């Protein structure tokens, strides 16, 4: 069974203080690793998808990287509007190989 | 707005009542997914459709739950004889995929169910 573990559970940063979120996974053949952002009371918003070890993707202050066992979401010089829960999910070859298995997320708070 | 649309956004019901939620996917998407999310947890997969065919169901989907996607367009999720443990956010997602290609699931805003 596919599993995703995210750390830390919660992270508080000051504006401009860079950090990284971790996503460790076990999966029966990786078909994709996904990062989503979720604001309170809303659905997850797609950020990135990574497919193979060594792959990196960037979007504004966010950069996602992937190894064979984990992924990192690096946040450079965060702003208060980056405050949200960041969810990591994997898609493996279990079942019909379509569902996403999510971690419990990292709640990020960025203060002035 | 061409995103995934879910209705209602909030539903309050009494234990034992039946409830039905609707999801309208992004128009060209052939796959539709239902997930459930409880407080402090990530979304958990319930079921998915490719066009009108329901291809996978989670063990979480008890016999009180049923989902349909008639004509491969919108989908409904019905919960019969609701229990307090059914209180959660029900999320719908859709994607477009042919064969073994890229699959990005786009989520709606969810329906929050409260069972009293």
Image (spheres, coloured by chain):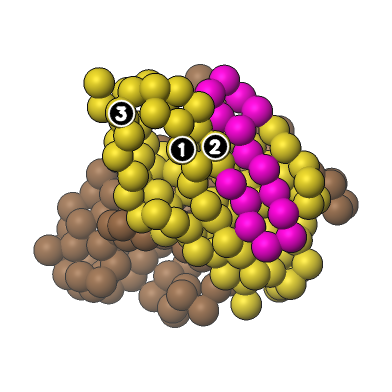
Q: Can residue A1 be seen? A: yes
Q: What chain is colored yellow?
A: A
Q: What's drawn in magenta, residue-wise?
A: A58-72
- Give yes or no for contact between labels 2 and 1 (Cβ–Cβ under 8 Å): yes
Q: CA distance from mark 2 to mark 3?
A: 15 Å
**Cα distance, mark 2 to mark 1?**
6 Å
Q: Position of residue B81 (x, y in %)?
A: 27, 73
Tag 3 residue: A14
Task: Determine whether the residue tagged by mark 3 lies in a helix, strand or loop.
Answer: strand
- Residue A66 within the magenta-colored segment of the rendering: yes
Chain of the residue displaying label 3:
A
Residue highlighted by disc 1:
A19
Q: CA distance from mark 3 to mark 1?
A: 10 Å
Chain of residue at mark 1: A
B47 or B43, nearer to the observer? B43
From the viewer's perspective, tell me whether residue B43 is left or right of residue B9.
right
Residue A76 or residue B4, whichever sits in front: A76
Q: Report the residue at 24% width, 49% height from top.
A: B11
Q: Residue at x 44, y 56 (%)?
A: A7
Q: Position of residue A71 (x, y in %)?
A: 62, 51
Q: Specify the quadrant of the image occupied by residue A30.
A: bottom right
The residue lying toward the viewer, choosing from A58 and A42, is A58
Disc nearer the start of the sequence (2/3): 3
Q: Earlier in the sequence, mark 2 or mark 1?
A: 1
Disc 1 secondary structure class: strand
């Amino acid at each position: 069974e596919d599993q995703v573990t995210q750390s830390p559970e919660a992270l508080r940063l000051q504006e401009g203080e860079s950090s990284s979120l971790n996503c460790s996974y076990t999966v029966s053949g990786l078909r994709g690793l996904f990062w989503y952002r979720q604001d309170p009371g809303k659905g997850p918003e797609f950020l990135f998808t990574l497919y193979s070890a060594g792959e990196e993707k960037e979007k504004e202050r966010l950069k996602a990287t992937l190894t064979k066992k984990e992924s990192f979401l690096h946040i450079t010089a965060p702003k208060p509007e980056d405050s949200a829960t960041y969810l990591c999910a994997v898609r493996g070859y279990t079942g019909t190989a379509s569902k996403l298995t999510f971690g419990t997320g990292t709640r990020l708070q960025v203060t002035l | 707005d061409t995103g995934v649309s879910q209705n209602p956004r909030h539903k309050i019901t009494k234990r034992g009542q039946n409830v039905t939620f609707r999801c309208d996917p992004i128009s060209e998407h052939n796959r539709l997914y239902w997930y459930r999310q409880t407080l402090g947890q990530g979304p958990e997969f319930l079921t998915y459709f490719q066009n009108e065919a329901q291809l996978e169901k989670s063990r979480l989907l008890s016999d009180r739950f049923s989902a349909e996607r008639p004509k491969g367009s919108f989908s409904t999720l019905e919960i019969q004889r609701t229990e307090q443990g059914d209180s959660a956010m029900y999320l719908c997602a859709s994607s477009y995929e042919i064969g073994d290609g890229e699959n990005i699931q786009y989520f709606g805003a969810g329906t929050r169910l409260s069972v009293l």
